[in-house]
Image (cartoon, grey):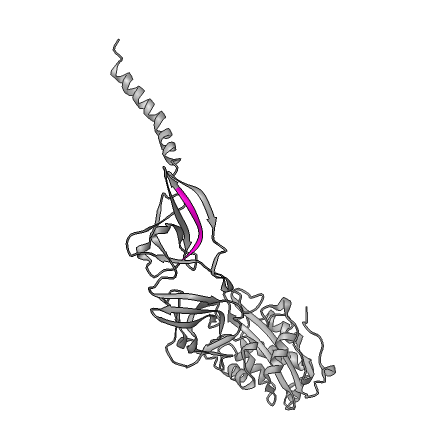
């Protein structure tokens, strides 16, 4: 008996609806025909054990050579586009495809931002002969600060591959740069020593780091603080240096105004360090406040701290400088240091470290910043005393509320 056409069509549609999801599901579960049958780890095998440099490789030719994902189902990169890149070996695997087996290397660039599996026949051992190559690295014993040797000279800070300029050092003449790595960089037949240095630009929370030829840098603390919103108390060289910063820096107006309340007393740098480390009423003047060790008061006597003023300023940090200064005058009067007495203290010095609403987006200046701004206040007075008669000094380290 002949089946009606409508029934056949309906049956066909029903069948189609039943099969299509199964076909889709089967396609989504399709597995790679490449299987890893053997693996060897090279993550701790070094070409330079002393400096923990992994085994380097580079593209063997300028022809197309693909970098694959682990399943060998997706082309990630073409090595012909990375002729100047040095790849570092992480592991080797034996991939089986049908009856054929091949050794692939899992390689990564130096920043680990690019990685994948490459047939070892497409790689040559060693650093790439093209571009700038870092062929030696050293991280140990890299502490110390540096600054641009020649002010105004256009010194560039480079990325790892020496292909992109991070910043021009001449735009940051007041910066102290901190070295974290020393490298030997090869370009053609020439080799040069570069330092990797970092710094926080303008004290505004923006970090930058990169490679600078060591000859452009001078070891030590920068005596020039032009344009710096904030300079750590330990980065000054002495009285002249510190007083110049207080006099000219954008966020030191309150510091200068408070110091001027003692018209015949000079700001003393070492006493200011003592104020920051030993007498900050709210533990805000030093970033690692929880682990700060008080510094010696040797060479000073009759140190007097003003914790009430320090705490008051911190509590009212958003006030205008004029309003804060008025409050400081009143609190000094209440503490027995009115204008008359302050005018007769030529034999006293001022120790002062004020961080007043300095932009601190990442919280890198003080331990507890407020809404992206750093604040810390530490004010003391004292006398220079070669005998270091600390018995006369206020011994109340780290005042608390």
Identified at 58% across, 65% down, the residue is: 368
Q: Indicate yes or no whether the magenta region holds residue 48.
A: no
Q: Quadrant of residue 342?
A: bottom right
Give the main secondary structure, helix, strand or loop, of the magenta stretch: strand
Image coordinates of residue 381 in percent, x first then y, are 65, 83
Describe residue 9's horizontal placement relative to residue 395 as left or right. Answer: left
Residue 261, picture quadrant: bottom right
Where residue 110 sits, quadrant-wise, is: bottom left
Residue 317 seen in the current view = no
Instruction: Check residue 91 for magenta coloring.
Output: yes
Residue 84 place in picture, x, y as percent: 34, 61
Q: Residue 91 vs residue 123: left or right?
A: right
Relative to 377, residue 68 above or below? above
The answer to whether residue 258 is above or below residue 38 is: below
Q: Is residue 179 at least partly visible in the picture? A: yes
The boundaries of the magenta stretch are 87-95
**Residue 216: x percent and y percent?**
42, 77
Front one among 186 and 205: 186
Q: Compared with residue 93, is residue 190 higher up or lower down, i.e. above or below?
A: below
Image quarter (top left, top right, bottom left or bottom right) of the N terminus: top left
């Amino acid at each position: 008996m002949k089946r009606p056409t409508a029934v056949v069509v309906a049956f066909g549609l029903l069948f189609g609806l039943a099969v299509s999801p199964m076909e889709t599901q089967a396609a989504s579960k399709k597995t790679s025909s490449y299987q890893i049958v053997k693996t060897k780890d090279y993550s701790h095998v070094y070409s330079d054990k002393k400096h923990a440099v992994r085994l380097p490789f580079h593209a063997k030719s300028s022809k197309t050579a693909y970098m694959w994902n682990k399943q060998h189902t997706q082309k990630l990169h073409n090595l012909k586009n990375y002729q100047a890149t040095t790849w570092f070996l992480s592991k080797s695997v034996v991939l089986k495809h049908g009856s054929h087996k091949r050794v692939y290397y899992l390689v990564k660039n130096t920043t680990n931002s690019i990685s994948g599996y490459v047939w070892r026949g497409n790689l040559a051992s060693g650093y790439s002969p093209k571009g700038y190559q870092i062929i030696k690295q050293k991280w140990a014993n890299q502490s110390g600060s540096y600054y641009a040797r020649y002010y105004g000279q256009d010194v560039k800070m480079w990325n790892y591959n020496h292909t992109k300029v991070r910043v021009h050092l001449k735009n940051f003449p007041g910066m102290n740069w901190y070295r974290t790595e020393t490298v030997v960089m090869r370009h053609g037949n020439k080799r040069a020593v570069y330092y990797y240095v970092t710094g926080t630009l303008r004290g505004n929370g923006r970090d930058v780091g990169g490679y600078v030829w060591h000859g452009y840098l001078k070891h030590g603390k920068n005596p020039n603080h032009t344009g710096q919103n904030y300079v750590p108390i330990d980065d000054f060289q002495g009285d002249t240096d510190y007083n110049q910063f207080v006099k000219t820096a954008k966020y030191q107006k309150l510091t200068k105004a408070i110091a001027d309340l003692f018209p015949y007393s000079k700001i003393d740098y070492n006493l200011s360090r003592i104020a920051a480390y030993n007498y900050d009423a709210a533990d805000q003047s030093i970033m690692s406040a929880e682990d700060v060790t008080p510094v010696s008061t040797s060479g000073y006597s009759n140190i007097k701290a003003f914790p009430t003023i320090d705490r008051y300023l911190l509590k009212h940090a958003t006030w205008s400088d004029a309003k804060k200064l008025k409050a400081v005058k009143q609190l000094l009067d209440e503490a027995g240091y009115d204008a008359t007495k302050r005018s007769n203290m030529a034999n006293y010095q001022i120790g002062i470290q004020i961080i007043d609403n300095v932009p601190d987006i990442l919280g890198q200046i003080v331990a507890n910043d407020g809404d992206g701004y750093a604040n810390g206040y530490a004010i003391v007075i004292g006398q220079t005393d070669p005998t270091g008669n600390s018995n006369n000094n206020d011994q109340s380290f780290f005042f608390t509320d």
